[in-house]
Image: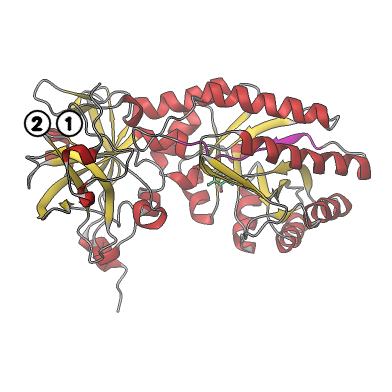
Amino acid sequence: MRAHEAGALHGDLGTRGPAWLRTPDDVNELVPQLWPRTVRRGADGDLQVGGLSVRDLAAEYGTPAYLLDEDDLRARCRDFAAAFAGADVYYAGKSFLCKAVVRVIDEEGLFLDVCSGGELAVALAAGFPAARIGFHGNNKSHAELGRAVRAGVGRIIVDSFAEIERLTEIAAATGTRPAVLLRVTVGVEAHTHEFIATAHEDQKFGFSLAGGAAFEAATRILDGGALDLRGLHSHIGSQIFDTSGFEVAARRVLELQAQIRDARGVELPELDLGGGFGIAYTTQDDPSSPGDLAKRINKIVDAECELASLRRPRLSVEPGRAVVGPAVFTLYEVGTVKDVDGIRTYVSVDGGMSDNIRTALYDASYSATVAGRASSAEALLARVVGKHCESGDIVVKDEFLPADVQPGDLLAVPGTGAYCRSMASNYNHVPRPPVVAVRDGAARVIVRRETEDDLLALDVG
Ligand SMILES: *Cc1c(COP(=O)(O)O)cnc(C)c1O
């Protein structure tokens, strides 16, 4: 493979992009880890997903649109379920939730995490068995908790002393004994290739381990007897590639588990290590397979249980991004191409920060390719931007696109299944795009496009 530094082609510093970005040998190439598994280039050079051309999909459903490869999503669910056999896999619904996806999660045998009354409503509306739902959140209201308990939600991950009180009241009022996990903050913050382990826990979620609040909370729940304390929970971050953060987290949580056993004579039967497994957004990202993740995490749990002389609790994990993120790409249409002399080329698409806030919010990196055709033009370093009145409205910071990219071209951005539609906004009153599921040559809208009537319907002044 010919691997030029971008700068070798573009002498000016400003057109170089990040050092890792290499000019592609072929701007039409699809790097497999970035794309849903049924995506390929058709005979005309157009991208195809589930056997359908993006040109036809754009004509039928418009742009921008999130295109979901349903086979890919199902395969990811199955891969996680198989890899974590003997454990429970909770899909983190906050990454993307709609009724069709809830049904897929159900059919593929996963459990489901929700973190608001709204997410719970979607799960229940789709008929997801409440017993397989976990309910998260650092500030669940009395009404939300009451609804969850009455619906028979399988477990509630308690996050504060106030919540213990609220749930205790609800248990009494409903004559139930809700199953709960205790969310523990362990002082491990994991992100991508690093994790930081500190003694303090400076964040809003959970009970502090180091400060003693976690032990105190466990004691109150066990003393109170109104709630069924099933286990401890830890979630250390997102987009994690290195499992050593899980090792520190598991050790700290299981030390608390041993402390509870020593003080109270109970070994809690469950342990949840959260989610956060990384996916590929660019060719630089090399995520682990669910099989590798499961192997490493199981080994960590075994070793840490042995260290603390504990029976192995039943494990659960909570992947969101790694289940749905890679199964979706966003299809845009290019509207303008602007060359800022010697600095860079701006390619504007018909969406932007309202359908993908992650670049602006987290400085996230994405990739893109011209999707409606193949090109034999040389590579040009471009920045893909949106149509919003905000200069930080960037979709893809740096990407090589064919130099003949032009208005009317379709552009596809992969890896947008997680935290894009779920975080979408109406900024500039741009209607939110639809989600179109594609499978075996058939497409169906699972979330329809928002309309101007929808926008005006809320505006009752
Ligand atoms: C967000 C979240 C997850 C999922 O994180 P991903 O990065 O999407 O895997 C899992 N558990 C908890 C508690 C979360 O807050």
Task: For the C terminus, give its image quadrant.
Answer: bottom left
**Rendered image quadrant of residue 374:** top left
Residue 432 in view, yes or no: no
Q: Mark 2: few, some, or many residues within 10 Å (few <14, many ≥20)?
A: some
Q: Amino acid at mark 1?
A: Val
Q: Nearer the viewer, residue 356 or 248?
A: 248
Is 273 on the left or on the right of 98, as rendered?
Answer: right
| Residue bearing the label numbered 2 | 375
Which amino acid, mark 2?
A: Ser
Left or right for 46, reference 14: left
Q: Is residue 51 above or below residue 445?
A: above
Q: Contact (CB < 8 A) between labels 1 and 2?
A: yes
**How many labels sit on residues?**
2
Q: Position of residue 27 (x, y in %)?
A: 17, 31
State the residue in front, 230 or 348: 348
| Nearest to the observer: residue 208 or residue 89 | 208
Ligand 1: quadrant of the figure:
top right
- Can residue 274 be found in the magenta stretch? yes
Q: Where, quadrant-wise, is the N terminus in this rendering?
A: top left
- In the image, the segment drawn in magenta is 268-278
* Residue drawn at point x = 86 percent, y = 49 percent: 222
- Label for residue 27? 1
> x and y percent of residue 58 in the render?
15, 40
Above or below, comparing residue 40 to residue 432 in the picture: above
Earlier-in-chain disc, 1 versus 2 = 1
